Image: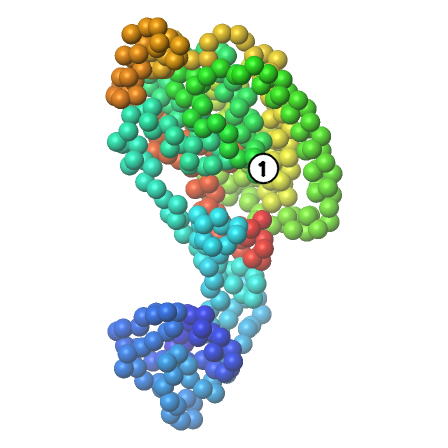
Amino acid sequence: MTLIRQIPTICRTHLLRSRSIAVLDRKQLPPKLFLCSNLLTRKNSTVLEDDKKKKHKHSPYAIAVNTPLPSRVAPDAETDEFILEGLNCFTINFGPQHPAAHGVLRMILELKGEQIVRADPHIGLLHRATEKLIEYKTYLQALPYFDRLDYVSMMANEQCYSLAVEKLLNIEIPERAKVIRTMFAEITRIKNHIMAVTTHALAYVRPGGVSQDLPLGLMEDIYQWATQFSARVDEVDEVLTGNRIWINRTKGIGIVTMQDALDYSFSGVMLRGSGVKWDLRKVQPYDAYDKVEFDIPIGSTGDCYDRYLCRMEEMRQSLRIIHQCLNIMPPGPVKVDDWKIAPPNRASMKENMEALIHHFKLYSEGYSVPPGETYTAIEAPKGEFGVFLIRAPGFAHLAGSDFMSRGHYIPDMVT
């Protein structure tokens, strides 16, 4: 004889009220055992007699009466996990309607009380077949799709795509465009970390440079913002870093060892928080990162608190990079002088027929890229963002959600 291993929510509620559990014979288990509206139903099923051989009227919930609930034994010495005799843990859905899931993620959590025993991530709720859509677009038309892959890392996504196309075209963009890209990539990193203002002009970074030069006065505005924001970072640091409640909610939560981070191919803060000093801006510099100085913060424990400290220090380092970009900003063009790749400006189209023709052909047919393949990666705010087939930085991190969440509580899952 065997016990039912999984019981839906309504069945468990009935189970807790009646203090009973269904007993089924493996040989008599009918072929059709199915879930319907979260109720466990069986066709032509029979309920076995209990130990006293008393027959009970069949319940639509497959619940027999007067059968005691299984007891919970002590934690297993080897696995340090509580074992329920005959009854599995509760199973709930975390997302996609949960406020912390933003409608893009579903986690099936197995709980022992409120403690997470197992997490099973389900992806694809925001799958939009981006790669398939790009197959039918020109290289210029494909650019806006990258803005929508991560709505708080749009500049970084554009930067990675543009670098990949430029590598295939074997072109070198102007120095001013490189510095502008670097500066806006760090502004995007700060915006990503603070989850504040999350969008600005989309499709700005593009193959060949940037779409247009900086407006007059923008550099002064960026300098003033960067100077003032430094004080705001210090205020957040003062409020949270030594806060007892914040420490209790983050310290020791979601620990990722250095070996686990490498085994699961983590990147970004998830990797550096575990003590691995790896940053593509340092080891494989792109655009103007080889012209600026910055430090790479790393953690020691690999928990949420260490990752918080890394993000706080990364915002300071991003401000440091922004100030350097403002100081070394060279004069000159912001995109390549090739109308077959970068569209001519509107003033020249009104005066030059050749410019008008190039503009028409560029937006109607696109530009041709030599046959070949490339993998281009950048250090996006959430980790390594790569373009070959699109590699989202959070995909590898999601694979580690199971071992990171075990033994913690539901609020810690959000952390």
At numbered mark 1, what does the secondary structure look like: helix, strand or loop?
Answer: loop
Residue type beneath disc 1: Ala
Nearest the viewer among 121 and 283 is 121
Percent x, y of residue 35:
34, 69
Q: Position of residue 238 (x, y in %)?
A: 74, 38
Name the one closer to the observer, 161 or 297: 161
The quarter of the picture where residue 352 lies is top left
Q: 123 left or right of 18?
A: left
**Percent x, y of residue 370:** 27, 18
Question: Pointer 1: what residue?
Answer: 196
Is residue 406 placed above or below 14 in the rendered structure? Answer: above
Task: Give the quarter of the image for residue 208.
Answer: top left
Classify residue 362 by image quadrant: top left
With respect to residue 196, does 120 lie above or below?
below
Residue 83 appears anywhere in the view: yes
The count of marks equals: 1
Residue displayed at 49% across by 11% down: 175
Query: 350 or 204: nearer the eye?
Result: 350
The structure residue drawn at horizontal position 53% and vertical position 35%, both measured from the top left corner, is: 198
Residue for point 36% across, 15% down: 343
- Residue 411 vs 165, above or below: the answer is below
Q: Position of residue 259 (x, y in %)?
A: 52, 41
Residue in the picture at 47% in, 82% down: 20
| Residue situated in front as seen by the camera: 204 or 351 | 351
Looking at the image, which residue sits at the far front? 350
Task: Name the image quarter holding the N terminus.
Answer: bottom left
